[in-house]
Amino acid sequence: MNLNSVVETRRASDTWKPRTAWLYLFTIALFAVVLGVFAGVARIDIRRLDARNPNVPGILSLLISLITPVIALIFSRVRTVKDFQDSFVLIPVTRQRIASAAVIGFLIQAVWLHVFEGGWKHLQLRTSFDYDALSALLAPFLEEPIGRGFLYAAFRKGYSVTASTVLVTAVELLNHAPFTFNSIQWFVLIVSFSVATCMLREKTGSLWPPIVCHLALNAIPAATQ
């Protein structure tokens, strides 16, 4: 095999470094500043953005939901579906590991409900499929490729498991800032979930267990109201 063939078959993730992750985060922060300025000029209260509210511009809400994975794909340098699968380690794992990931996600949510929300009695099954349910089901497929697929992998090229986990967890907290900085229970939930999924990513070498864990974590919110 010649050198050109080796370069062509190399995964995009081989070039990911902590510097790549930091540049991505800087770009996201810059976008947030620009968005904030735009919202201020347009007199839009970002705290009230909600796709269920017809008075809020739907295009802005959609932009916020999609911009981070789009920018992550640009920085990750993936160009094809095969390259995406290889670089984001969407590789098969055993059923036992998938089942364990699902149990971990479900238990984190169940314990959190028991400790902070007074148990399950106040929960009711959804009678319709709405924006909240859709967000809960889509989040694992939008957030995990960024957090555990891209950022964690890039940080791990230069930092320890602990440092990489702390950095990714900090990003998760910032992404959910309206919840995490106003409520200790949300802080605990996101930190425990982020640590668990980073460990799953580290131990299994695949992105599927974190995705499954995230789906299991969101299963209760998606099914109840």
Image (cartoon, grey):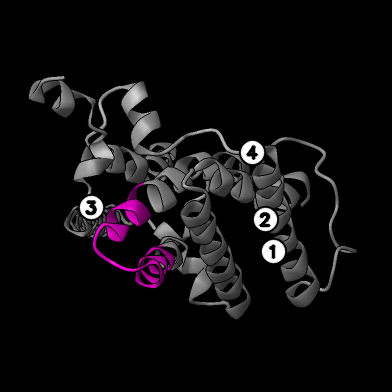
**Segment colored magenta:** 150-171
User: Which amino acid, mark 4?
Assistant: Thr
The residue beneath circle 2 is 105
- How far apart, in angstroms, are the residues tagged by discs 2 and 4? 17 Å
The residue beneath circle 4 is 94
Give the class, few, some or many, for how many residues have Cα within 10 Å of label 1's Cα (few <14, many ≥20).
Answer: some
Which sits earlier in the primary sequence, circle 1 or circle 4? 4
- How far apart, in angstroms, are the residues tagged by discs 1 and 2? 5 Å
Q: Is residue 61 above or below residue 178?
A: above
220 relative position to 140: left or right: right
Give the class, few, some or many, for how many residues have Cα within 10 Å of label 3's Cα (few <14, many ≥20).
Answer: some
In which quadrant of the rendered view does residue 112 lie? bottom right
92 relative position to 116: left or right: left
Which sits earlier in the primary sequence, circle 4 or circle 3? 3
Q: Please state which of residues 145 and 69 is positioned toward the viewer in this rendering.
A: 145
User: Which amino acid, mark 2?
Assistant: Gly
Q: Is residue 43 magenta?
A: no
Which sits earlier in the primary sequence, circle 2 or circle 4? 4
User: Which amino acid, mark 3?
Assistant: Tyr
Residue 207 % position (x, y): 49, 43
Q: Please state which of residues 99 and 137 is positioned toward the viewer in this rendering.
A: 99
Q: Is residue 205 above or below residue 164?
A: above
